[in-house]
Image: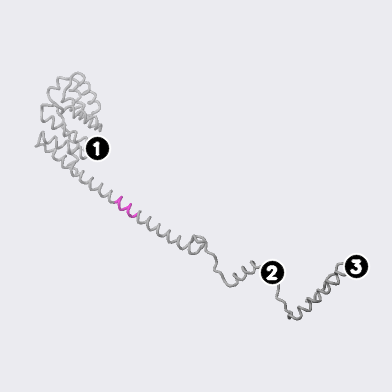
Amino acid sequence: MTRFYVIIILLFSLRVNAQIQNAHAYKGNQLYASGHYKEAAAEYELALKEKKNKETQFNLGDALYQQKNYEAASKQFEAAGRNAKDKSLRSASNHNIGNTYLEQKKWDEAIKYFKQALKENPNAQQTKYNLAYAQAMKQNQDKKDQQDKKDQQDKKDQQDKKDQKDQKDDQKDDQKDDKKDPQKNGDDQKKPDTGDRKKDEQQQDQKPQPQPSKLTEQQAEQILNALNQEEKKLRDKKEKGKGQPVRLEKDW
């Protein structure tokens, strides 16, 4: 792993003699070599304002890369390699673009540019190492993503099982409550009728009834005759002007 890391940060840096003629480019090279990457980038930009040069664009990309400004560095490498006649420059540009994606852990993009660099220079050993590293990291990432996906699915399945179990338990509890509370059964159950309750309801519904007479038929007839005689006497008295109400005394 350490070996790969050393290779990852290794950059191609083209410093051609022609750049000596450009004072800003020359100064930029000196600053870069001493580790003053920000100042070197400023000198390379001044040099490019005076004259467009692919090697200076490449070196500006190096200086930006060392400042971890990977997006801007990638643009400079791409500009340097675009339509370059020199295969080594095209290969180096693609290699360094691959490095910018490698630093961002964008394995697919890194692999793409390392392969492109090897097309221009199949013998570039450093590019081969970086390609192998990117491929190994992508494989590890894919395994991790698959495991994370599996873990999430397992967690979801466990939660679904738990929810189903909780739902069944709730249904069982509801059924137990329904048995305890007749009102929840939906049929408004009443207490079972007993003989005493039926008797009470019958007594509440019935009106008072006269008790059967304990007199014999002969006794009843004698009393009826007596009443008739009393009524006859009352009528006679009423006719005589002594109409006083009389209260009949019954002996039954």
- Vertical side of 244 occupied by 103: above or below: above
Q: Amino acid at mark 3?
A: Lys
On the image, numbered disc 2 is attached to which residue?
Answer: 208
- Vertical side of 218 occupied by 147: above or below: above
On the image, numbered disc 1 is attached to which residue?
Answer: 104
Magenta region: which residues? 151-158
Q: Amino acid at mark 2?
A: Pro
Mark 2–mark 3 CB contact (< 8 Å): no
Q: Amino acid at mark 1?
A: Gln
Per the model, the C-alpha gap separating discs 1 and 3 is: 139 Å
Report if residue 155 lies within the magenta region: yes
Judging depth in this view, the residue of 143 and 249 nearest the camera is 249
Residue found 61% across the figure and 71% down from its top: 199
* Mark 2 crowdedness (10 Å alpha carbons): few <14, some 14-19, many ≥20: few
Q: Secondary structure at mark 3?
A: loop
Q: Quadrant of the N terminus?
A: top left
Judging depth in this view, the residue of 203 and 181 nearest the camera is 203
Judging depth in this view, the residue of 116 and 10 nearest the camera is 116
Figure disc tally: 3
Q: Is residue 210 left or right of residue 239?
A: left
Per the model, the C-alpha gap separating discs 2 and 1 is: 103 Å
Q: Position of residue 150 (x, y in %)?
A: 27, 51
Q: Position of residue 228 (x, y in %)?
A: 81, 73
* Mark 3 crowdedness (10 Å alpha carbons): few <14, some 14-19, many ≥20: few
Q: In this rendering, which labeled residue sits more in front, label 1 or label 3?
A: 3
Residue extending farthest right: 241
Can you tell which quarter of the image residue 45 is in? top left
What secondary structure do most residues of the magenta stretch adopt?
A: helix
* Residue 240 badge: 3
Residue found 30% across the figure and 53% down from its top: 154
Q: Position of residue 214 (x, y in %)?
A: 72, 79
Closer to the chain start, of discs 1 and 3, is 1
